[in-house]
Every structure is written in structure tokens, then in C-alpha cells.
Image (tube, rainbow, N blue to C red):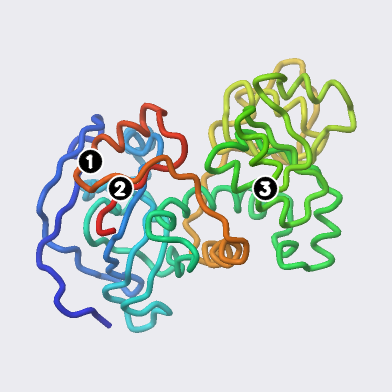
Amino acid sequence: MATANLPTTIRAVYQQDPKLTTLKLVQTPIPQPAGPQDHLVKIKGTSPCLGELGWEVSFPDLFPPNRERVPGTEAAGIIATSPPSSPFKPGDEVYFRLHARFPGCLREYTIVHTEELALKPKTLDWAEATATPLSTLTAWQGLFSKGILNKTGISGDADARAHNSKLRVLITGAGGSVGAWAVHFAAAAGAGAVVAQCGSANVEAAKKAGATEIIDYKKQSIAEWAQEDASREVDLVLDCVGGSSLAAGWSAVKENGVLLSVVASPDDLKPESVTKKLAKSTWYLMDCKGDDLKEIADFIDARGLKPQIDSVVEFEDFQAAYDKVEQKKAKGKVVIKVDI
């Protein structure tokens, strides 16, 4: 199934050298679907991910040789063509996160696979939908797939909520893009306690999202907070910060608890004084699962939630957008307009 009047060439941005973060705008042939899962998607917007332009150097085994080096792993857009067996049809409005090994979304059209796709939340505009997949998937999977909360608690399942009500969860970086979503998800699933570590400026937002306890990192460390009262120990730590916050997570997690990080290996930062054993302590990468994004879209639409957006910039400002993210100057997601 195809949309008529597709262009033969498109604007695309390339990272020509994986060792450099400089990007170049070029004109290229429109990508051609080649497999039974391939959809051609007209990109509305894409959002840079911190560290993205260094992944090929850091993880060379993940990337095929001579790949088309187009950055931008998360996006929203409109299906232009779809394979015969696809549940998605031309004209569908979708959002997704691509596997990083594939050419990305900083171009007018790209190829997206069935497993990665979901219809975008109806309550989000194109910029908001663009800024949503990566952060929400990371938070959702950290709590429900990799973590120990039962996601069906969100839909009111009594057994799941009973299970979740016995669990205490600590989320570090709760003022950031991933952490803020994690607070919403954990609270909605009925976690017994949702402890949010964030700065003073984000305390009220964390409480509104459902946090039951706050650690203001500008006033107190996680270790200090945990040592004040042994009953504060948590069953699950979801770390979105790394560094000293991740190391301090060992002070807060219970014996046989779970310590997950999206930043670094918890075992590498385990303090020598800690002797407790955990059921799981690991760094994880989110999976590009459209099925999860479908559930997330339903959650967002039901509650009217929005992602954190730092700025929305024109397509031609792609280099400045990536530089801002790489320099950690963005407060929320930077969205690059491709056709918004």
C-alpha cells in the first residue's frame, strides 16, 4: 500500500565520520522498503539523544559496516507506504523509536519496522509526539519489564495493584525526561511508595505526578536520607542519573532488592562498605517495542500528560540542536522540525 506522488530525492543529514559530531545536509534518493516489515514514513520531527553521535565508536559491534549514517532514533510521522501484512496503513499518524543500527530519522522519509511502530497519542501534537518515545519506553521498561512492578496495575487490575502496593520504588533524576515519566507510571500502577529524587525546582511537579516522598538532592543525599530511617529502604531503585546518585542507590535498596540504571553499571559503583546482595543490579537499554508505545499512548491520552520539551528548532538548525544536547544544556527534549 502506498501514498501517491512520493519524491524521488529527499533532504537528509549525515554524520560522515563516526569519530566526529559534525553533521552535513545532503540530497539523497528516497529510501526504498526492502523487507516484509518495512514501512516508509514521512518524518514530522526527530529528537537528538545524548551521546548518540558517539555510539558507533563506543559500541562498534552493534553497527553494520558501511551503514547509512543518518542520526535521529526517535520520531513521529505519517505512514507513506506499508507492507501488505501490516496493521498500519498509509496516512496513519505514528511515533516510534528506531533501533540505532538502522538509518535514522533526520531526513524527510525513513524506513521503520512493524515492531517499532505505534499510533501516536491523539492528545499530543507532532513536536510532543516526537519527544516522547525514548523517554517513556526507558521509564516503562525500567519499572515493568526489567523492574518488579506489574503494569496491569495501571488499568486497575486488583491483584497487580495489591502486588505493587507492597513495593517501595526510588527514582533518581525524577525531574528529568525519563525520571518524570517513571514517577507517573509507578504512581499510576499503585506502587506502595514512590520516592522521587530531584532538585528544589521540580519538587512540586514530582508530587503532582504521584511521588509520595521527596529527596531534594540540593539539601540531602540519598545515602543520608536512607540512613535516617531503616524503614525507608526500597525494593526497586530506577537510576536515571549515574555517578554519586547511582552509588548511593546501594544505601537505599533492600537486601534482595533490584537496582537498575540507564546510565552505568551499578556494580561498578558499588561502595566497598556495602555487603548486601541484590536480586538484580544492572545497566539496561530500552527495547524498541511498538506494543509498549501503544500502551503508553493510551496512558498519555487518558491523563492528558505532556513530555518535557526544551525547544523546537527548524530542520536547518540540526547541528545546533545536537550540540546543545551533547553539551548537556537542554532542559528537556530538543525537537528538530522536519515537516511540522
Q: Residue at x 34, y 46 (%)?
A: 312
Where is 21 relative to 68, above or below? above
Residue ID at (41%, 28%): 328
Task: Answer with left or right where residue 60 lies relative to residue 289.
Answer: left
Please report whichever mark, 1 or 3, sits nearer to the chain's N-terminal start: 3
Residue 63 at x, y percent in the picture: 32, 46
Q: Which residue is mark 3?
A: 209
Mark 2 neighbour density, 10 Å: few (under 14) some (14–19) many (20 or more): many
Q: CA distance from mark 2 to mark 1?
A: 8 Å
Q: Amino acid at mark 2?
A: Ile
301 vs 79, nearest the viewer: 301
First in sequence: mark 2 vs mark 1? 1
Distance of mark 1 from mark 3, alpha carbons? 33 Å
Q: CA distance from mark 2 to mark 3?
A: 27 Å
Mark 1 nearby-residue class (10 Å; few <14, some 14–19, many ≥20): few
Residue that mark 1 sits on: 317
Work out which quarter of the rendered image holds the N terminus and state it. Answer: bottom left
Question: Dot 2 corresponds to which residue?
Answer: 336
Quadrant location, the C terminus: bottom left
In this rendering, the answer to whether 13 lies above or below 113 is above
Q: Amino acid at mark 3?
A: Ala
